Image: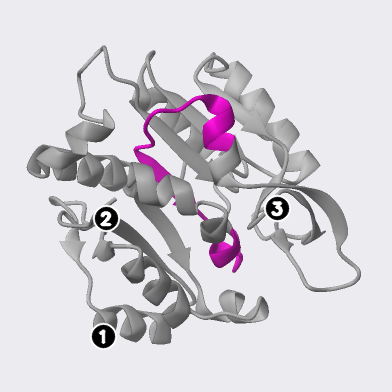
Amino acid sequence: MQLSNAPHDFGRQVAAALVASIRQTIVHIQYLDWLGIMPCRGSQTRRSSDVEANIGFFTIKFAQWVGEQGRVIAIEPDLENFATLTAKIAAAGLERRVQLHQAAAAAENGSVPFQRNELHPGDHRITRSPEGIMVPAVTIDDLVAEAGARSISLVKIDVQGAEMLVLEGAKRTLGEMRPALFVEVDDRNLADLGTSARALIAHLEQAGYEMHELSDDGPARKLSHNVLFANLQSRSYVDVLFLPLLDQDN
């Protein structure tokens, strides 16, 4: 999804709903305070990871949200998008809050084949095609460790079907830090890389996460399998908020 320099109303609503939902969850679920992500506590550090940051709308929103004590880890593999993202972060005066990485998030460090969509800068993706260009690959686990983060509040993932690869490289972060996850679920794109929406949901449920849908009139609501897959029949993708179960052992 591409957002213009002047944020679309839809993008603004999604960002507002996401922040409101996460904050509401924090208020109602005390155990998340152990991760140091309760709002308005200057001694705590909140961190967010924005995978496939693209032109930086959400990266900037998250950087404004986490405040002076927080940090955002933003990952963008495309050189042109990365240059735009870097310039926007600088123009917003948020360089100290945002750690930028020109790479693709994947299951392991190294390199991966990457396909650019010349007509849509938000549609570049990891590919199986031999025509893909090679770009650096990093794991969320290693970036979190490199950043010295003691807690991660949120991981936002929008990577055109490579979500399972990102999650494979984030097992330690999900298991130990239990961040909320905001994930684009697109069954067709997932199938292009040999997986599916059902496999993605099963993977996260096995990891102790539960699906929710965002609302602009209150906290996030639980999302059932039936509703999710009905929605996927009528539109190409669904953005899902995954929250960790309270009784999940870390």
Residue 148 or residue 2, whichever sits in front: 148
Distance, label 3 to label 2, CA atoms, is 29 Å
Whole-percent x, y for residue 119 in the image: 76, 60
Is the residue 242 above or below the residue 19 in the image?
below
Judging by the rendered image, the residue that carries numbered circle 2 is 243
Judging by the rendered image, the residue that carries numbered circle 1 is 226
Tag in front: 3 or 2: 2
Distance, label 1 to label 2, CA atoms, is 18 Å
Whole-percent x, y for residue 53 in the image: 58, 43
Which range of residues does the magenta coloring cover? 143-165
Residue 74 shows up from this direction: yes
Whole-percent x, y for residue 192 in the image: 66, 79
Q: Is residue 68 left or right of residue 81?
A: left
Q: Residues within 10 Å of mark 1 (few under 14, many from 20)?
A: few
Q: Quadrant of the N terminus?
A: bottom right
Under circle 3, the secondary element is loop
Is 148 in the magenta? yes
Whole-percent x, y for residue 70 in the image: 39, 21
State the image quarter where residue 16 is shown. top left
Which numbered disc, 1 or 2, marks the residue that appears first in the sequence?
1
Q: Label 3 sits on what residue type?
A: Pro
Residue drawn where x is 22% and y is 46% of the image: 21
Tag in front: 3 or 1: 1
Residue drawn where x is 54% and y is 47% of the image: 3
State the image quarter where residue 245 is shown. bottom left
